[in-house]
Amino acid sequence: MEDIKIGIIGGSGIYDIEGVENVETVGIDTPFGKPSDKIIVGVLKGVKFAFLPRHGRGHKISPSELNFRANIYAFKKLGVEKVLSISAVGSLKEELKPRDFVIPDQLFDRTKNRASTFFGDGIVAHVGFAEPFCPEFSKIAYETAKQIGINVHKGGTYICMEGPQFSTKAESSVYRGLGFSIVGMTALPEAKLAREAEMCYVTVALVTDYDCWKEDEEVSVEKILANLSVNSDNAKKFIKTILPKLAETSVCSCQSALAMSIVTSADAIPKETLKKVKLLVGKYIK
């Protein structure tokens, strides 16, 4: 299969995109196990892309159970260079209303039980992560949402919690006090692994609720699902509009994140470990 430059990971409620042509379903094995589901490859607006339902079809995989490494590795195997993540979140600020979009520019990690690197087992790599989302890609995402009339906010910190339970009031209050903007369960380690795989990565966060800090707003699955339905329709319009823009060639530092990051001598890396990550490091270690 020819290289597919654009990969979309759909969050809650984004399982199918209407209007996709030449659809193929691809099963991919990786050294890190199987991805969340089979990957859908198709053409939309003349652009070939790959789509992966993050939680599997039918929403059967909890955030803590997601095999993030397999998901990102599978995209890398297809040739993906840009990953668009669609993710449902709670709002920690009054002005970020349910059904709004947020294009965050920072992350804060509160996950506990997730493998967050492709490396280890005899190979060490320290990638830069000061800007966890690709700035150029984020700019395109923000401008696209504005173009189609979505109420969108630029910037802000996404705090990623373990879940699957929602926040306590004490946690939500602390997050707000620290100035965080939105809270979700899936951006990490997804963003870290995309950086290690030298992919441009952006999260488009779809606000479903006010977490539990707002006294006059109840957080319920029923209300969240209603907002998800509206957000999903907007997200599909967004994807159709942004795909042709992402097909344009661009160069940024994300695409060379490993260039100066591997600190282990090539002759010291175990053969089995090198085989496992060869797809990622092959251009630096022969």
Image: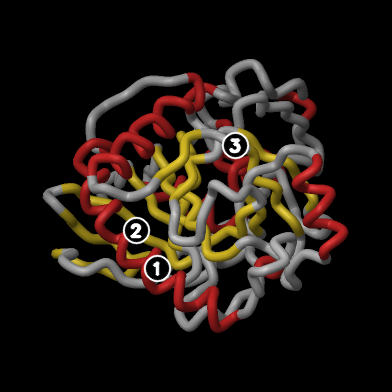
> Of label 1 and label 3, which has the lower sequence position?
1
Question: In terms of depth relative to the viewer, which is nearer, 232 or 75?
Answer: 232
Outermost residue toward the right?
170
Q: Is residue 3 left or right of residue 252?
A: left
> Of label 2 and label 1, which has the lower sequence position?
1
> Of label 2 and label 3, which has the lower sequence position?
3
Asked if marks 2 and 1 touch (Cβ < 8 Å), the reply is: yes
Q: Is residue 154 left or right of residue 122?
A: left
Where residue 167 sits in the image (x, y, percent)?
77, 64
Asked if marks 1 and 3 touch (Cβ < 8 Å), the reply is: no
Residue 184 lies, with reference to residue 122, above or below; the image says below
Residue 105 bears which disc, if any? none
- Camera-nearest label, 1 or 3: 3
User: Callout 2 environment at 10 Å: few (<14), some (14 to 19), or many (20+)?
Assistant: many
Q: SS of the residue at dot 1?
A: loop
Residue 156 bears which disc, if any? 3
Q: SS of the residue at dot 3?
A: loop
- Residue, disc 1: 14
Q: Is residue 162 left or right of residue 229?
A: right
Q: How many marks?
A: 3
User: Callout 1 environment at 10 Å: few (<14), some (14 to 19), or many (20+)?
Assistant: many
The quarter of the picture where residue 223 lies is: bottom right
Quarter of the image with the C terminus in it: top right
Mark 2: amino acid? Ala
- Residue, disc 2: 235
Cα–Cα gap, marks 2 and 1:
8 Å
Cα–Cα gap, marks 2 and 3:
19 Å
Question: In terms of depth relative to the viewer, which is nearer, 254 or 240?
Answer: 240
Q: SS of the residue at dot 2?
A: helix
Say which residue appears at 80% left-offset and 42% top-offset: 177
Cα–Cα gap, marks 1 and 3:
23 Å
Mark 1: amino acid? Ile
